[in-house]
Amino acid sequence: MDDITQIVQKVRQAPWRVQRQWIGLILLGLVLVAMAAGIYLNVIVRASITGREIQMLTSQIEENKRLNADLVTQLAVLTSTENMRARAEALGFAPVSPDEITYIAVAGYQGKPPVDLSSGKANSQPSLLKPEYSETLFDWFTRTISAGVTP
């Protein structure tokens, strides 16, 4: 009991110590709140910067799509029949009649082989897998026993 009374007397003799402790606790709380607010602000800023970068990249993608479509349109105009005919005539080419065409027979040339799209034909390519690797354990065991060799 004497210890408690001594502590109470010391606190009563120095009330500024208690005030310092309260001020310290309040300042500590303010510092913790400020740190949490700073971290939150940092996260928010990074997220908004990343969102803005995504918006910019999306707009660049859309611009590139429009540019690509424009180039495809220009290519279609340049390779149209009318333009190609005009360019060929400007280079000195002229349309030919069937009487002006000369066909040359090349000895040994068979032409392109016909394409067979039927599903009934078996695969004509040889298997790249060796027979040793396609043998089952049962087949190997049967072959070994029938040969009279013990495994």
Image (tube, rainbow, N blue to C red):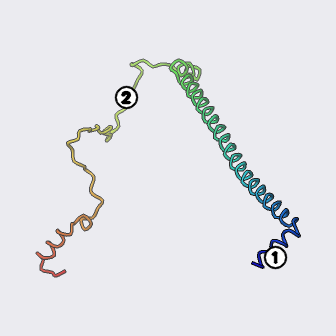
The residue under the point 81% across, 61% down is: 22
The residue under the point 56% across, 22% down is: 77
Residue that mark 1 sits on: 6
Residue that mark 2 sits on: 103
Looking at the rendered image, the quarter that the C terminus falls into is: bottom left
Of badges 2 and 1, the one in the foreground is: 1
Front one among 110 and 77? 77
- The answer to which of marks 2 and 1 sits earlier in the sequence is 1
Residue 9 lies in quadrant = bottom right
Q: Where is residue 12 in the image (x, y as percent from the top left)?
A: 86, 68
The residue under the point 71% across, 46% down is: 45
Counting the numbered discs, the total is 2
**Which residue extends farthest bottom?**
150
| Few, some or many residues within 10 Å of mark 2 (<14, 14–19, 20+) | few
User: The residue tagged with tag 2: helix, strand or loop?
Assistant: loop
Q: Which disc number belongs to residue 20?
A: none
Cβ atoms at labels 2 and 1 below 8 Å apart: no
Looking at the rendered image, the quarter that the N terminus falls into is: bottom right
Residue 116, placed above or below residue 88 = below
Residue 72, placed above or below residue 81 = below
| Few, some or many residues within 10 Å of mark 1 (<14, 14–19, 20+) | few
Q: Where is residue 92 in the image (x, y as percent from the top left)?
A: 56, 22
Kindly identify the amino acid type of the residue bearing the numbered disc 1: Gln
How far is disc 2 from disc 1 in space, using C-alphas? 125 Å
Kindly identify the amino acid type of the residue bearing the numbered disc 2: Tyr
Left or right, residue 79 beside residue 103: right
The residue under the point 85% across, 67% down is: 17
Q: Where is residue 81 in the image (x, y as percent from the top left)?
A: 50, 20
Front one among 104 and 69? 69
User: The residue tagged with tag 1: helix, strand or loop?
Assistant: helix
Residue 35 lies in quadrant = bottom right
